[in-house]
Structures are given as structure tokens and as C-alpha cells.
Amino acid sequence: KKTADRLGAKLVYYNGQGDATKQLPELQRAIATKPDALVLVPLGQAADTGPVERAMAQGTKVILCDSMINSDNYTSLVNPDPSTAAKPLAEWLAKRMHYKGNLLYIGGLPGNGTTILYDKGFNAVIKKYPKIKVVNGGNANYSISTAKQLTATALASGKKFDGTWGVGGEAVTGILQAYIDAKVKPIPPNAGAAATNGRDAITRSRSAC
């Protein structure tokens, strides 16, 4: 916004609300205005491919941020490598778990390019340790409240978890909030990764928190 103001450019914001199905019609509305440039965080890697290619065909420059589409027909991509970012943290978590036990996994947004890459890095590490059993608690869709609810449900099952993993900072936060509310002590090691301002930010918690 500051850059647009400085350059005298008109900035119009369309909100997909973190939902690929809600973003798609907003994206189509934006493209219909024939903007000079479009900055997009794709929430649906496959679904957003066609609209982006149509925007490019009409002469709109498309800058993708944080996630990709199923095409290389775009102007530029600003994206950290979530897969690379996830690997050292997954190694940290495996070590804290002594390479065994139940690991509660709270996912991100299905079909989202960043989620796919976070999972790729996480799975590449965890599959090396067969004594770690991943328990899928569901997808939080990058929502703190959803991650908290999913974690609370997992805890209510009576299963003990030796570690937890959240896809995105929202999932990490929701997991920890659920443990605090449930008064479960000690809180098991919790790990996850999130991309912030073009850099990979890592959130870690220790059982003493």
C-alpha cells in the first residue's frame, strides 16, 4: 500500500478469506477489471491456474506470492521454499521425541501450494523414523481456532502425544492453546513452519512453556 501510494497507483484489494472456493470468484472479478498488474497468493494451486493464464493473455502482469499454480505462465514468483524450511524443524522435533512415539499432525489448506511443500519437507524427514507414528488430526486451513478445535478433539480421545506438528503458524498457535486449556502437562515438543515477509519463520515450543 505504501508503494502504491508513493507511485500514485490505484490499489484494489480482494479478500479470499483464506478459502480457495471464496478466492476464485474474487480472482475472476479482479481479472475482469483488466488491471495493469495482479498480486496473488494462490489458495488453490489447480483452480487458480486458468484465471492466471487468462489474466496473462489479456496483458495483466501477474505476481504470485508464497504459493504456485500448475503453470509457468506468470510474470514472477516471490516465494520462500517451504519444503527446505520444514526439514530442519522436523529433524528437531524427531530428536526431541527420541525418534519414537505418537506425533499429532494438524495440516494446512488442502490443495494449497505452500501446504503441499511444507508436507513434502515434513514427510521426507519423518519417514526416516518408522517408530514415529503420525496421527492426522485434520486440516486447520490456516485458522488458529480450527487448529485449536482439532487438537482439543484429539486430546479428548485419550491418546497421548509425544510431539505435535502444525502446518503454518496458525496451526502451531492453535495446538498450544488447546494444550494450555486442557491443562495437559508437560506440553510435548511442538513444531511448525510459516512464511513471513518472504522469509521462513520457524516456531518452536519446548515442553517447559
Image (tube, helix red, strand yellow):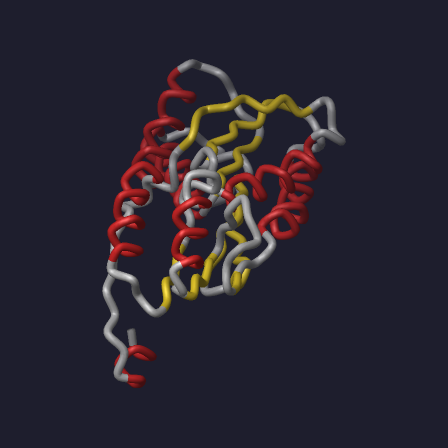
Residue at 59 percent of width and 23 percent of height = 102
Q: Nearer the viewer, residue 200 or 66?
A: 66
Image position of 65 (left or right of 97): left
Residue at 71 percent of width and 29 percent of height = 127
Q: Nearer the viewer, residue 178 or 89?
A: 89
Q: Position of residue 41 (x, y in %)?
A: 41, 53
Q: Residue furthest front?
A: 58
Q: Nearer the viewer, residue 195 or 28?
A: 28
Q: Residue furthest right?
A: 128
Up/down of 180 relative to 197, above or below: above
Up/down of 52 relative to 90, above or below: below
Image position of 16 (left or right of 206): left
Quarter of the rendering occupied by the N terminus: bottom left
Q: How many marks?
A: 0
Q: Position of residue 6 (x, y in %)?
A: 29, 85
Q: Nearer the viewer, residue 22 or 199?
A: 22
Residue at 67 percent of width and 25 percent of height = 132
- Where is residue 158, by image quadrant? top left
Up/down of 1 relative to 65, above or below: below
Image position of 108 (left or right of 84): left
Residue at 25 percent of width and 70 percent of height = 11
Q: Position of residue 91 (x, y in %)?
A: 69, 42
Q: Position of residue 185 (x, y in %)?
A: 45, 31
